[in-house]
Image (cartoon, grey):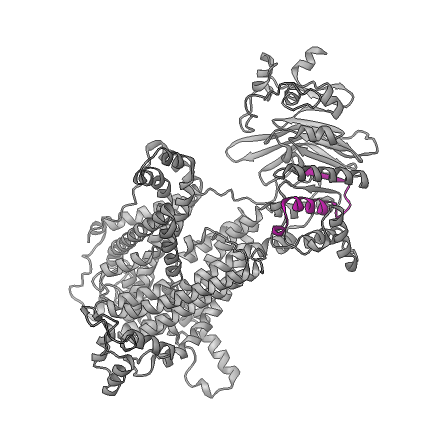
């Protein structure tokens, strides 16, 4: 039997794209291991006549003594029920099993691909009909259906392939449809449609190339399922008697006394072949899927990297300083590439009742800095220098149990985007009560509901919403619920990380007002992370302006607004409308913030700075003290000193 | 396998629970009707016309053949306009629909009549009824064990992601996934007979005179190897799904909130992650039910377990088409109903599906 189908499905990838693909494919060992395991079997199948010591299915003279011979010098893997060489049949069996697998998978992929493309691309009635049909077929158990059809028709190899192929398309249709839907709404496809490209052109030129990779993964998986199904059918007695696949070898051995003869070799060897191929395909599928759908494979429970550097720093502090952050630096460590220097040498201190604004563009390290305060950095994040003192105790050197005592009970966080920050399957009241019980285990149970109601009342949520789930809340309510939760344990410090992003202006104003009122009422210290300078001007006592992970300027808000020293602060203020000067022209800062993994060698702001000179390109500026409580990092300040 | 189990099925949130339940039930009923029609035509369209061939089966007694003729109206046209479908023979379209094979088939089905076995001359429904219970016993035990083990392995693999524990669990799971079910069954059969475990059937002959507890213990012994096979085969897949589902949940923002609240890892897993991660598992378990039947056919055949699965294999061997047809129908309907049950469970577990 010729094995034409036993070649991997061709993919249109040019040389350079292939190199890129291969590089990311190699990152996960599963893919390459599976690939080479499969190549090995394919080579064996192709060169079967040269590898085998006997003719296929040859048993010229069979005597009783030839049956079920254990492995010996003549028959390395023994003989089977017909006195045939197991090793020879095993090698030829690879041909048949692979042929069935590839051919059946090809049929499944073509049917599933066409159904999925048609349903996804044309939509409407076609989609409804095809997808409903797919759903129905998905529920009907397929091996029993295959058994019925093959049993009624003749169990010839072509029949088996057709049945396995025709019944195996459902998953592919679903996956291809959703991919087509996703691709269809991409810009370049919409553009092609807008300029009047024909449907056929769009499908073949724009959609198919993007659906192709998913089809390849599906094909790999379909081959392994087809091989397993063929062997199961053969084992039940529905194999082609003239095509000795691995499954058929097992059927003969099991049905013709290998068990009672103790002929383990006749049973173990063909099964090993199936396991080898299916495992190879599984690994290959895993590897390909990793390339298509890279998953970071990290999560919030993975242990963080231990802190390095940062000796304890002494020095007297004013009594009312609650939080003192000194020279903190945070890197993201990526295996194989240089670390991303997300936060570099930042210091600030927070007094009781003080509201500090932390200002900066997206991606400048604000959130990283805030997460580091409570050791909440993702697994790749590492504090490489500096300390965080809370009432004189260094938080960065605490272990998990110690820091868990501080988290939320002393320092709490209002996360941005409260939709995702609240657990969707627990009621809001329950999530608030949880944190009270965690930090005050002796809190009287009967008072708990009252306390939760009290907190909700504080942020203006009626107590009958206590039993509701987050998805039943509006966006503003969720944010307020988050604030109520942050206040549950009477903390000293509340970190509000962009609490009003994604809310409309009216709600934003309400939330800010609420935060400010609560601060005054409860004597909280608040760190307010934002990119809205107006809010900082209105609410805050102090402002820390960050640029590219560094302190640009740190001062009282009045100073920041009236005599900014850093060019970045100055430019920011120019971009900000001032009601007292209505005719003033607003200006934007050209360019983009730097990427943290490829920082410029000198000052991080230099490429966008209107006042940059050559020293700025070479040398990072130090943080200069301008007067007490006013710091900025810029070479210009040194020159003026 | 839903995209091989590595992709978590998309969650859809219908707006209210009652409508969701009604829709799902309606779909299950529609699917069952589809299967009933498919089952009828499969045995008449495909070459050989097994339905009629049966009447000529030499193994059947004369009385049985007459009973079949009357019971299933095999001398009547298949359906309006067609005498037979293979070969296609056009007939009168004005026949009373109630006088066609199709409606007689449906009517018989509604009365629980599935035909008469060629092999034993006994009603198919009677044979299958005895065996359904045994299969449910085996699949039930195997499912429960593999789900428990898979979930526990999956939790540890995700929690200790990218450590030796994780890689170990992944390797074992992928290996288990790649094993052909019947082959593992054969290997365990070898091992079981070597250490003296019962390897065939459901009970030792003559046990029925023993006290009830001794009978149960005997059945449990016979169940050990089939259940073990079943557990190993499906455990790997559940581990992979639970791991990837929990990994997704643990990267959500609300887990960071839970961590910021000062909860420790065990509290976070127990109170915030597990319920959310289990939700997709319910869907996967439902989708898997069809595949577990495939496993049951193979396992029951190897261990001669008297269930639906081995009756399929026996019917194939004996070309006993009424039993095959009946078994397929019963398996398909059971899987569809079990699927519906899992779907409805999901509706109740996820608060995002609201009550009207």
Q: Identify the residue at horizontal 43%, vertical 65% (top origin).
A: B28
Extreme residue toward the top, this view: A640
Magenta region includes residue A495: yes
The spot of residue A150 in percent (x, y) is 27, 65
The N terminus of chain A appears in which quarter of the rendering?
bottom left
Q: Identify the residue at horizontal 84%, vertical 33% (top origin).
A: A319
Extreme residue toward the left, this view: A60
Most foreground residue, A41 or B14: B14
Horizontally, is A295 left or right of B305 in the view?
right
Relative to A24, say whether A594 is above or below.
above
The C terminus of chain A appears in which quarter of the rendering?
top right
The spot of residue A197 in percent (x, y) is 33, 35
Most foreground residue, B305 or A214: A214
Q: Image quadrant of residue B270?
A: bottom right
The spot of residue A346 in percent (x, y) is 68, 28
Q: In the rendered image, is residue A37 in sight?
A: no
Total of numbered circles in the picture?
A: 0
Relative to A270, say whether A584 is above or below.
above
Extreme residue toward the front, this view: B94
Horizontally, is B338 left or right of A639 in the view?
left
Most foreground residue, A428 or A441: A428
Q: Which residues make up the magenta segment?
A: A470-497
Relative to B39, say whether A404 is above or below.
above
Magenta region includes residue A546: no
Most foreground residue, B178 or A309: B178
The spot of residue B197 in percent (x, y) is 44, 74
Q: In the rendered image, is residue A150 in sight?
A: yes
């Amino acid at each position: 039997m010729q094995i034409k189908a036993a070649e991997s499905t061709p993919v249109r990838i040019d040389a350079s794209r292939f190199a890129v693909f291969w590089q990311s494919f190699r990152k996960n060992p599963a893919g390459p291991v599976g690939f080479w395991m499969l190549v090995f079997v394919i080579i064996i199948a192709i060169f079967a006549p040269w590898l085998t010591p006997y003719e296929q299915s040859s048993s010229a003279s069979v005597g009783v003594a030839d049956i079920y011979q254990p492995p010996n010098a003549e028959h390395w893997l023994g003989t089977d029920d017909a006195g045939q060489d197991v090793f020879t049949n095993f090698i030829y069996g690879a041909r048949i099993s692979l042929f069935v697998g590839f051919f059946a998978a090809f049929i499944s992929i073509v049917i599933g691909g066409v159904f999925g493309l048609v349903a996804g691309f044309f939509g409407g009635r076609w989609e409804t009909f095809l997808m409903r049909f797919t759903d129905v077929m998905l529920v009907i158990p397929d091996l029993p259906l295959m058994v019925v059809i093959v049993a009624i028709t003749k169990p010839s190899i072509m029949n088996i392939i057709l049945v396995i192929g025709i019944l195996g398309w459902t998953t592919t249709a679903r996956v291809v449809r959703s991919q087509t839907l996703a691709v269809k709404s991409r810009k370049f496809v919409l553009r092609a449609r807008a300029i009047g490209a024909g449907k056929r052109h769009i499908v073949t030129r724009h959609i198919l190339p993007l659906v192709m990779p998913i089809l390849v993964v599906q094909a790999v998986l379909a081959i392994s399922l087809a091989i397993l199904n063929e062997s199961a059918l053969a084992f039940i007695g529905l194999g082609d008697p003239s095509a000795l696949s691995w499954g058929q070898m097992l059927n003969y051995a099991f049905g013709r006394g290998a068990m009672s003869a103790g002929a383990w070799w006749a049973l173990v060897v063909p099964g090993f072949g199936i396991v080898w191929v299916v495992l190879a395909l599984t690994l290959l599928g895993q590897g390909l899927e990793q390339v298509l759908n890279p998953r970071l494979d990290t999560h919030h429970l993975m242990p963080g990297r231990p802190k390095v550097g940062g000796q304890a720093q002494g020095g007297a502090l004013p009594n009312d300083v609650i939080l003192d952050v000194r020279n903190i630096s945070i890197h993201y460590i990526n295996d194989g590439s240089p670390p991303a220097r997300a936060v570099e040498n930042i210091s600030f201190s927070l007094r009781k009742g003080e509201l500090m604004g932390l200002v900066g563009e997206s991606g400048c390290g604000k959130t990283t800095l805030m997460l580091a305060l409570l050791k909440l950095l993702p697994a790749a994040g590492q504090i490489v220098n500096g300390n965080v003192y809370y009432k004189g105790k260094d938080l960065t050197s605490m272990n998990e149990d110690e820091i868990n005592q501080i988290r939320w009970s002393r320092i709490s966080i209002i996360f941005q985007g409260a939709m995702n920050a609240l657990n969707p399957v627990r009621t809001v009241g329950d999530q608030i009560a949880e944190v009270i019980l965690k930090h005050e285990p002796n809190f009287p149970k009967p008072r708990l509901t009252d306390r939760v109601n009290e907190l909700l009342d504080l942020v203006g949520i009626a107590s009958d919403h206590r039993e509701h789930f987050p998805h039943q809340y509006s966006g503003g309510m969720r944010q307020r619920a988050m604030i109520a939760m942050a206040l549950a344990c009477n903390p000293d410090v509340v970190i509000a990380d962009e609490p009003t992003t994604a809310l409309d202006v009216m709600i934003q104003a309400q939330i800010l007002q609420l935060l400010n009122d609560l601060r005054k009422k409860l004597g909280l210290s608040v760190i307010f992370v934002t990119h809205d300078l107006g809010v900082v001007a209105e609410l805050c006592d102090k402002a820390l302006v960050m640029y590219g992970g560094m302190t640009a300027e740190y001062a009282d808000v009045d100073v920041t607004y009236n005599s900014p020293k850093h060019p970045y602060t100055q430019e920011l203020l120019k971009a900000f409308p001032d009601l007292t000067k209505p005719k003033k022209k607003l200006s934007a800062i050209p360019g983009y913030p730097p990427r943290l993994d490829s920082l410029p060698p000198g000052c991080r702001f230099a490429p966008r700075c209107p006042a940059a000179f050559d020293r700025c390109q070479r040398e990072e500026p130090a943080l200069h003290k301008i007067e007490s409580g006013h710091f900025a990092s810029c070479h210009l300040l040194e020159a003026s000193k | 396998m839903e995209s091989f189990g590595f992709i978590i099925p998309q969650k859809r949130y219908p707006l209210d629970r009652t409508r969701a339940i009604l829709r799902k039930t309606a779909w299950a009923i529609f699917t069952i009707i589809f299967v009933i029609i498919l089952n009828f035509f499969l045995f008449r369209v495909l070459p050989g016309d097994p339905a009629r061939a049966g009447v000529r089966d030499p193994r059947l007694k004369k009385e049985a053949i007459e009973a079949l003729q009357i019971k299933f109206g095999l001398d009547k046209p298949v359906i309006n306009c067609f005498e037979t479908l293979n070969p296609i023979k056009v007939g009168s379209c004005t026949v009373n629909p109630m006088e066609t094979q199709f409606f007689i088939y449906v009517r018989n089905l509604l009365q629980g009549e599935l035909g008469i076995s060629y092999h034993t001359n006994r009603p198919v429904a009677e044979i299958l009824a005895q065996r359904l219970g045994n299969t449910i016993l085996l699949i039930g035990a195997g499912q429960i064990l593999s789900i428990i083990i898979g979930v526990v392995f999956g939790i540890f693999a995700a929690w200790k992601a990218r450590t030796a524990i994780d890689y170990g669990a992944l390797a074992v799971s992928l290996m288990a996934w790649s094993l052909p079910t019947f082959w593992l069954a054969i290997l365990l059969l070898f091992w079981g007979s070597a250490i003296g475990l019962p390897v065939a059937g459901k009970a030792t002959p003559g046990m029925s005179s023993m006290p009830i507890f001794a009978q149960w213990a005997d059945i449990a012994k016979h169940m050990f190897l089939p259940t073990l096979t079943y557990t190993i085969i499906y455990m790997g897949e559940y581990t992979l799904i639970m791991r990837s589902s929990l990994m997704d949940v643990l990267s959500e923002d609300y887990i960071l909130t839970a961590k910021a609240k000062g909860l420790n890892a065990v509290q976070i897993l127990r109170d915030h992650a597990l319920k959310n991660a289990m939700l997709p598992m319910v869907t996967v378990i439902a989708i898997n039910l069809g595949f577990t039947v495939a496993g049951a056919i193979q396992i029951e055949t190897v261990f001669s377990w008297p269930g639906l699965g081995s009756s399929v294999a026996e019917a194939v061997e004996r070309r006993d088409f009424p039993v095959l047809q009946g078994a397929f129908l019963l398996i398909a309907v059971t899987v569809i109903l079990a699927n519906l049950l899992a779907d409805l469970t999901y509706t109740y577990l996820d608060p995002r599906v609201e009550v009207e």
